[in-house]
Image (spheres, grey):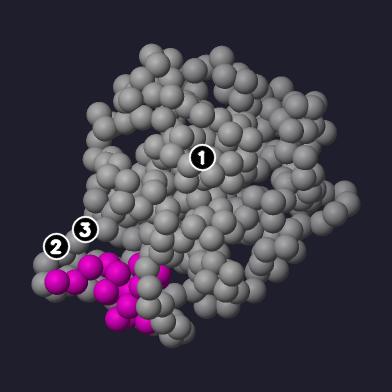
Amino acid sequence: MTHLKRLAATLAVAALPLFAAGMVQAQSGCAPDAHRVAQGETIFTIAQARYGDPEKWTLIYYANEAALTASVFQVKPGDMLIIPCEAGSQEADATPLRQDENAEMKLLTGSDFAPFTDRTWQGQGLVTELVNAAMEATPDPVTYSITWEDDWSQHLFPKLDRKEFDMGFPWYKPDCDATPNNERCANFHFSDPLVEVLVLLFVKQGSGFVYESDADIPGKTLCRPKGYFTHDLDRAGREWISKGLITLVQADTPQACFEQLQAGTVDAVTVNVFLGAETIDKMGLRGAVVPLEKPLSSEGLHVIISKKHWRGTTFLYRFNAGLAALKESERYNEIVSKHLGIFWDRMKVN
């Protein structure tokens, strides 16, 4: 089904409804359906009517990504939308191929990266569960182990570079065509993207900050936490950093970025949708800080393997084949929808 294939493209701008009022408890269960947009309807009102909760609009977005990607929230009367089912059980699938000892393939990940990878999360996170499901779907599946190392600085060098582990996840991929000498590009192969996550601009409510095109950004002061990637800000056609078109502040933590936003020393904070929503929630800034609708960039999360690994291409081919099969199935949609629901449910409780 074409609309299921689209789900691989984007983990969408799920933060915006977090700041809306009037949340209603969602009803469980639905039947996939085609819906013709009526006059005055939005994806929020359709989600409210179908799921009982406007935050569930993201399910509609994922299933219609090709049609909605240019204007995330805008639908017109007469547009046809696929209305998918809500996620069912929050239980993770069994993983019969996963074992701690004597596994043929050894994978490395880390915690504290919710909702993607975290040992305390259901299924140990969205990406972990996608990796498990893809390994099950590979041709000639093999046993595998997953080791948790929470010091992410140890993953690429030395552990993966020295082949202490076969593959690691999840990692952002720089623009390797433009920057082939980038450390990650030069030393690692990347899988197809497991998911793509939108990076947003978060601004003070009522600030007047407008982002309709890249022409609106030069002259602005943006904050992104220290140690986070910046390749999207300097990609071909932008070159905002290398040409000095923006002032980039790299604060020590996401919280420090949002503190500077509140103090008026930066115009916007730019982080991924989930980190932004979680930080705003923890800092009690709901309503005071809002995300802009237009994404700044979309960044894939990948499995990586050292280019020095003698079975690198074989392992990567096997994983990509399993991931492709998973994306063709209903299971991919179920996993993504489930973890998205868990994330926003947690935001409501906090």
- Asked which secondary structure carries label 3, the reply is loop
Tell me which label, 3 or 1, sits earlier in the chain: 3
Tell me which label, 1 or 2, sits earlier in the chain: 2
Residue carrying label 1: 260
Q: Where does residue 170 sit, x and y in percent of width and height?
A: 62, 43
Q: Which residues are magenta?
A: 40-57
In the image: residue 246, left or right of residue 251 = left
For the residues labelled 1 and 2, the Cα–Cα distance comes to 38 Å
Q: Tell me if residue 56 comes above or below residue 115 in the rendering.
A: below
Between 170 and 151, the one lying in front of the other is: 151
User: The disc labelled 1 sits on which kind of residue?
Assistant: Gln
Q: Where does residue 24 sit, x and y in percent of width and height?
A: 41, 82
Q: Where does residue 100 sit, x and y in percent of width and height?
A: 85, 54
For the residues labelled 3 and 2, the Cα–Cα distance comes to 7 Å
**Label 1 crowding class (10 Å Cα cut-off): few <14, some 14-19, many 20+?**
some
Residue carrying label 3: 74
- Asked which secondary structure carries label 2, the reply is loop
